[in-house]
Amino acid sequence: MFDNLSRRLSDAARNLSGQGRITESNIKDTLRQVRLALLEADVALPVVKTFLERIRERAIGEEVGKSLTPGQALVKIIHGELVALLGAAHTPIDLRAQPPVVLLLAGLQGAGKTTTAAKLAKRLIEQDKKRVMLVSVDVYRPAAILQLETLANEVGALHCASSTDDDPVAIVDRALDAARRSYADVLIIDTAGRLHLDEEMMQEVTAVHARSGARETLFVVDSMAGQDAVNAATAFDNSLPLTGIILTKVDGDAKGGVALSVREVTGKQIRFLGVGEKIAALEVFHPERMASRILGMGDVLSLVEEIESKVDKDKAEKLARKVRKGHGFDMSDLRDQLQQMSQMGGIGAMLEKLPMAGRIDPAALRQGVDERALKRQIALINAMTPAERRFPKVINGSRRKRIAAGSGLQVQDVNRLLKQFTQMEKMMKKVARGGLKSMLRGMPTGKIPPGLR
């Protein structure tokens, strides 16, 4: 989401190379570039002005330490101001109330409220071990009610039925009663949205909120909406006691300015990020980590947490033992690795969280990655017999044709997969013989990364 902004900020900081101290004169052009970068990212103009003024006040006269270049010193200042702009540390959903605790989602139509309601329910069920009920008061779109019911079944949540003939406030009363009878811990209300702000909409959502007694009122906003998102956030903040913001479609072609603008305009914390279409694609928003990602420093901590939560530890241990022995790695193990990578959003999602050295553009890297290749490789392995997965060397010409036909792909795809498997098998045998150091020394830097020594 922040690819262009990251690149422009890095270029701006690089202009200070060779300077011994940050001064009014040498920072002027750099701040102009920072300003352009923020405006290009759709950050609201008042936010840009306030942000740059804070950077200027901190940067002028800043002594550049021996261990830092002026550019690095500026990046450090920008990082600190970004953290302040994006808010304090993450605040978890407040569930400290008499059940059912009500969470109300509000926002414009198309922001992704219904899907976000299901994602939030899944998170509360799996991580907080809560019994969750979902209800839709969107009486204008029958599809929204049906969609929420379908998603509730998918995530294992309870569902309170509603229809287009019902009154939204009456639905809330019925849902609260149903939640109590079902001993639900949490009731999530998906409210109606419109394509634009209007008085009728705001009156309705205000009435629904008043009757529900919501503990958390979360504004769901499309990160690709640009300045419209800022206007909508202001309107909802004036009508409802918002407690937080959820940014959706962060994985899309968004410029990133919405995250900075909405937080500054409303003063409310961004609580979660919707990072994909999958029902598990909801990330906790950490201001400091997001500031690091904006400046191209990566977010390794979030990547580690995601790996810990989504990687099957038993399978990982089994694979580690095979690698140590130098044999036994087969197609079933490769399929497990591909499936786990897919569950984490694919290679592109992982690249976004890795620090990009120098001028490497993460967007360019992702464009060079075919995410569909993971699904094709999994399909090929699924088309193999158990014996073929265990002993890939038995796969001859006729077997390759059968596997290709069974997966709906070409024989060339089978050949490519088998070649990749052979290369991985050789690499693992080399690692088992203690060849990791020599492999790493063959990297472009010629050095072993400190964390792998």
Image (cartoon, grey):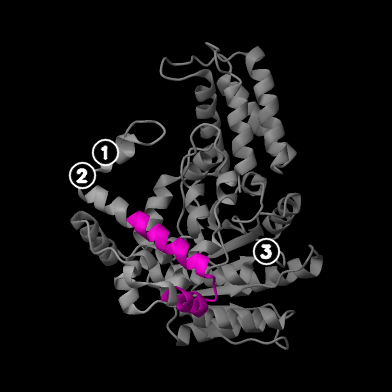
Q: Is residue 290 above or below residue 10?
A: below
Q: Residue farthest to the top? A: 20
Q: Is residue 190 above or below residue 226?
A: below
Amino acid bearing label 2:
Gly
Q: Is residue 268 visible?
A: no
Other residues around mark 2 within 10 Å, as few (<14) / some (14–19) / many (≥20): few
Disc 1 and disc 2 in contact, CB within 8 angstroms: yes
Q: Quadrant of residue 74?
A: top right
Residue nearest the observer in this picture, 400 or 406: 400
Q: Is residue 161 above or below residue 417?
A: below
Disc 2 and disc 3 in contact, CB within 8 angstroms: no
Q: Quadrant of residue 4?
A: top right
Q: Is residue 449 left or right of residue 138?
A: left
Using the image, tell me which numbered label, if any, was put on residue 111.
3
Residue nearest the observer in this picture, 396 or 177: 396
Quarter that holds the C terminus: top left
Residue 91, position as x, y percentages in the image: 46, 53
Q: Which residue is mark 1?
A: 437
Lower sequence index among marks 1 and 3? 3
Q: Is residue 142 left or right of residue 99?
A: right
Q: Which residues are magenta?
A: 399-424
Q: Is residue 401 visible?
A: yes
Q: Is residue 1 above or below residue 74?
A: below
- For the residues labelled 1 and 2, the Cα–Cα distance comes to 7 Å
